[in-house]
Amino acid sequence: MTSNASLVELTNQHLIANYGRLPVAMVRGQGARVWDADGREYIDFFPGFGAGGVSGHCHPAVTAAIKAQADKLLCCGNLFTNQPQVELAQAVTQHGFGGKVFFCHSGAEANEAALKLVRLAAGEGRYKIISFNQCFHGRTMGALSLTPEKFQKGFEPMLPGSVKLDMGELAAVEKAIDAETAGIFIEPIQGEGGVNVPQKAFMQGLRKLCDKHGLLLVCDEVWTAPARTAKWYGYQLHDIQPDVMTLGKALGGGAPVAACVAAPKWAGVLSPGKHGCTLGGNPLCAAAGVAVCRLIEQENLLAKAKADGAKIVKAIADARIAKVKQVRGAGMMLGIELDGPGKAVFDRCLQQGLLVNLTQDTVLRLAPPLIIEQSLLEKGLEILIAAMRA
């Protein structure tokens, strides 16, 4: 009989140990709930590390789209077009700033594509990229170059030209710009860094600096979109428009699809031969993405994200928990900063059947699926509040 213990043992035998895995094996999911191999049920406030952030686990609309597409066409290669890919590109661009889309599999790959696009667009001799401390843009070598040094140890040397600054220091950004600077990468809300929200004035200042110096502004929306912040895209919180944005995680409802979206001005930069991805935007994953975008529209999930996020913030504030320093974020992308290490709180949540995430040692990250029903949201909040009080 399959159990947590047996599957964990097999994992230890056959998989590279690059993840700090918990001794739990998940075997089934539905909506905002998952079950492990021992039959235990959990409320999931962090589905698929963000991949289930809109539709949760095995949403009927997403699974139906995958099943239907699986009977038609799984792959055809990107020398040919396919209908789900076109439909997903339309859905992505119509809610943003237009432009055109390059599809791949993951957020890191989308950021790699954005890096190449920015360097090409900026022109010869301009290669430097400004990013910000506590950011996270991925673990591939280019994306890793933009990400904090603690993730880079052992992989040096990094891609040359990476300049890291403190978020919010606009004067420092302008000082760092020189004739070799090509662009700026920023998350509309930092995820791995602790759910840090930049000031609107700072984001608007970055836009102005890019316009002034001929740089490209890239918004890494791998965590913030689609719909998680109660906006289709996180940059819309700041009343700006980037030149490029990158998407991943929740876009495919659990299927691996990601995107690099270029504004109309830059949509022709990645010309034939400049970049590629064999299975990027394959019909199966694209069909899942189309289902996710339709779900957001049909179930008015932007409004639901706003209302449910406010409900979480109010419940934590009303609980008046001494160890809670701050709750920050937007919509259903929230971080609870504690006054000390949060591992014990994380462990108590797990023991009581609630899945959350701990980042930066002291910040509990919550990203419940936008489709979560109120009864599960309230039950999960009860567990969370009790765990923080203990």
Image (tube, rainbow, N blue to C red):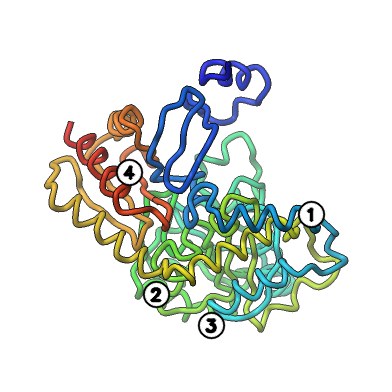
Nearer to me, 338 or 64? 64
Residue sitting at x 29%, y 56%: 328
Image-based side of 319 in relation to 250, left or right:
left
- Per the image, the residue denoted by label 3 is 211
Q: Nearer the viewer, mark 3 or mark 4?
A: 4
Residue sitting at x 53%, y 36%: 28
Report the Cα–Cα distance between label 3 and label 2: 16 Å
Q: Nearer the viewer, mark 1 or mark 4?
A: 1
* Mark found first going from the N terminus, 3 or 4: 3
* Mark found first going from the N terminus, 3 or 1: 1
Q: Position of residue 114 (x, y in %)?
A: 65, 64
The amino acid type, in three-letter code, at marker 1 is: Leu
**Residue 363: image tag:** 4
The amino acid type, in three-letter code, at marker 3 is: Asp
**Residue 45: image tag:** none
* Mark found first going from the N terminus, 2 or 1: 1
Q: Position of residue 224 (x, y in %)?
A: 46, 61
- The secondary element bearing badge 4 is classed as strand
Image-based side of 322 in relation to 359, left or right:
left
- Per the image, the residue denoted by label 2 is 238
Report the Cα–Cα distance between label 1 and label 4: 40 Å
Report the Cα–Cα distance between label 3 and label 1: 42 Å
Say which quarter of the image contains residue 385.
top left
- Per the image, the residue denoted by label 1 is 74
